Image (spheres, grey):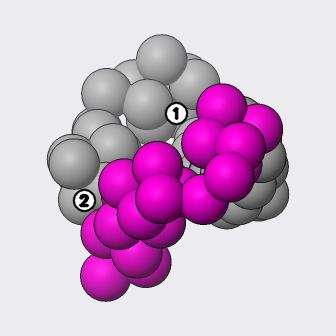
Amino acid sequence: MEWWSFELLVLLSGLLPNPKLETSVLSICLNTGSLMFMVPYGLCTSIYIYMVSKRKNRPLREAIENNTWLRDLNL
């Protein structure tokens, strides 16, 4: 729902006096919002995989392969 609202705002910005400026500001807001979501998500995922590999005493490569459900969960 949140992403749809950004797309709708981009379409409606064509009705404003300076549509290029409005579209660029909205794209900056959208990219900043996605960055603020992805950085903590990636950090938490990498810490989780590292901790699982240390707790179960198995190689890091095996822990990553066995925890691909984290990546699939996001898709």
Q: In terms of secondary structure, what is the magenta stretch mainly?
A: helix
Left or right, 31 with reference to 21: left
* Residue at the extreme bottom of the image, as rendered: 1
Magenta stretch? 1-23
Residue 62 higher or lower than 68, as above or below: above
> Which circle, 1 or 2, is nearer the viewer?
2
N-terminal label among 1 and 2: 1
Q: Residue at x 33, y 44 (%)?
A: 71
User: Residue 6 location in percent, x, y?
Assistant: 47, 64
User: Residue 22 location in percent, x, y?
Assistant: 70, 48
Residue type pointed to by label 2: Leu
Q: Residue at x 68, y 52 (%)?
A: 17
The answer to if 53 sits in the magenta stretch is no
Residue 22 higher or lower than 58, as above or below: below
User: Residue 53 location in percent, x, y?
Assistant: 59, 42
* Residue at disc 2, secondary structure: helix
